[in-house]
Image: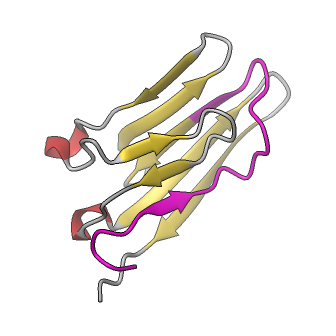
Amino acid sequence: VKKGDSVTLQSALNEMKDNEQIQWWFEYKRHLIAEINVTADRFTVYDDVLDGRFRNRLKLDNQTGSLTITNTTFEHDGHYNIKYHSSVVSSSAPIGFALPFT
């Protein structure tokens, strides 16, 4: 990844359904950066966390739940977790990625 590139973190869902929720966390579930709650019709990015390092850089796909970080810098390197919940199943999966800048 080059400085300034965009990185998309995939949710592994093809489509969000009723009663589903997704939360994207940065640094081992310490900082909530985005969430989708289909039931409440809420699609939110929290780009002012951590002194605004994600400000104007988070794009949330409300159909698949994937999260794109645009214009990346070394500050975006770290561990990302997705927490998934529906009326049928609940799970959490770590997604670690590093941004080796060239």
Q: Nearer the viewer, residue 51 or 92?
A: 51
| Residue 94 vertical position relative to residue 49 in the rendered view, above or below | below
Give the main secondary structure, helix, strand or loop, of the magenta stretch.
loop
Magenta region includes residue 11: yes
Residue 22 visible at all: yes
Q: Residue at x 35, y 84 (%)?
A: 100
Task: Specify the quadrant of the image occupied by residue 32.
Answer: top left
Q: Residue at x 60, y 13 (%)?
A: 41
Q: Position of residue 59 (x, y in %)?
A: 45, 43
Q: Position of residue 2 (x, y in %)?
A: 34, 79
Magenta region includes residue 83: no
Number of labels in the image equals 0
| Residue 17 vertical position relative to residue 3 in the rendered view, above or below | above
Please provide the residue range marked out in magenta: 1-22
Q: Is residue 55 left or right of residue 31?
A: left
Q: Is residue 87 left or right of residue 22?
A: right
